[in-house]
Amino acid sequence: MRKKDEEGNEYLLSVYDVEQAKVMAQVEVGRKENEITKAPRALKLVEISQKVITGDAMHTQRGLATQIIEAQADYVLPVKENQPQLYKNIQSLFAPEYPKPGFGKIQTDFLSAQKVNKGHGRIEIRRITTSEMLNAYSAWPGLAQVYRLERQFQWRRNGRCYRTSCEVEFGITSLIRKQAPPLRLLNIRRAHWGIETGLHYRRDFTMKEDATRMTLGDMGKVMASINNLVLALIRQAKFQNAAQARRWFAAHTSKTFALLTLPFSRF
């Protein structure tokens, strides 16, 4: 789940299936409404049993976590200062140890994994460390593991690194280690950002949604729904590039109408 607008305007909160590249449900968030209260309503519109729900840190709320667990689903959520005690506990757990002379280090259950991705002149190194040590102390609904995720970026040109950056994320999950060892958690958290490239970028730039003048009344919501449908149909037709797909279907109208009659694959 992720919000569409960051400037205080009305926007649509979507439940997005990253694997199938489909918007499964969306609800309107008004200017004076809180997205946190809308997320539970959006999830109720979708069958989430046996699914893994991810979201932004604002959705790391006890009520939403409880709703997910009661629906027989799981969550992987980042933790920031909006949950101060939880954030502090996870941060302290993974803080470096500097034992005094004569005292050994505290025994931990940490497990780690690392992945390196290269492309577009950038190297991304992601390291995750997980622990179950807070399970017995935290009252957070369904908590099974906490994690520390570090992302290091190197921008390279002509064989030289000219820029670097590093960011750290703390988070929680209801997935036990048998279900989600560190490498799987690393992949789940990365997949969350598929909503940016698979939905938001395509709607904003490929479908020119940000530039549309059709915003009166419900026109904006209608256009967003149409764009969601078009992008889902494009993915069902096995196209990875939405702009290329639009050009191809514009030149093959019979194929366009045929695609509209095909049933969607099941969620």
Image (cartoon, rainbow, N blue to C red):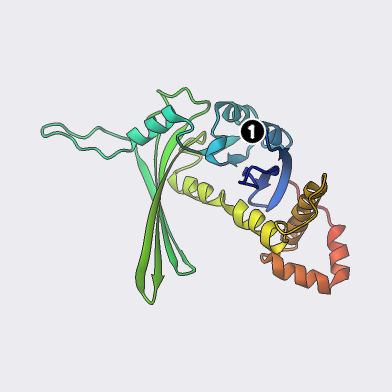
Residue at which label 1 appears? 34
Image side of residue 219 versus residue 123, left or right: right
In the image, residue 136 lies at what x, y percent?
A: 41, 23
Q: Residue furthest left?
A: 102
Label 1 packing within 10 angstroms: few (<14), some (14-19), many (20+): few
Q: Residue at x 51, y 47 (%)?
A: 189
- Tell me where residue 54 sits by quadrant: top right
Image side of residue 97 versus residue 12, left or right: left
How many badges with numbers are in the image?
1
213, above or below 172, in the image: below
In the image, residue 161 lies at what x, y percent?
A: 35, 68
Q: Residue at x 43, y 45 (%)?
A: 182
In the image, residue 109 lies at what x, y percent?
A: 34, 36
Residue in front for this viewpoint, 186 or 82: 82
In the image, residue 90 lies at what x, y percent?
A: 39, 34
Q: Residue at x 64, y 33 (%)?
A: 34
Image side of residue 195 versus residue 238, left or right: left
236, above or below 79, in the image: below
Q: Please, what secondary structure does the residue beneath circle 1 have? A: loop
131, above or below 17, in the image: above
Q: Amino acid at mark 1?
A: Asn
Q: Residue furthest bottom?
A: 158
Q: Quadrant of the N terminus?
A: top right
Q: Residue at x 53, y 47 (%)?
A: 188
Q: Quadrant of the C terminus?
A: top right
Residue in front for this viewpoint, 119 or 105: 119
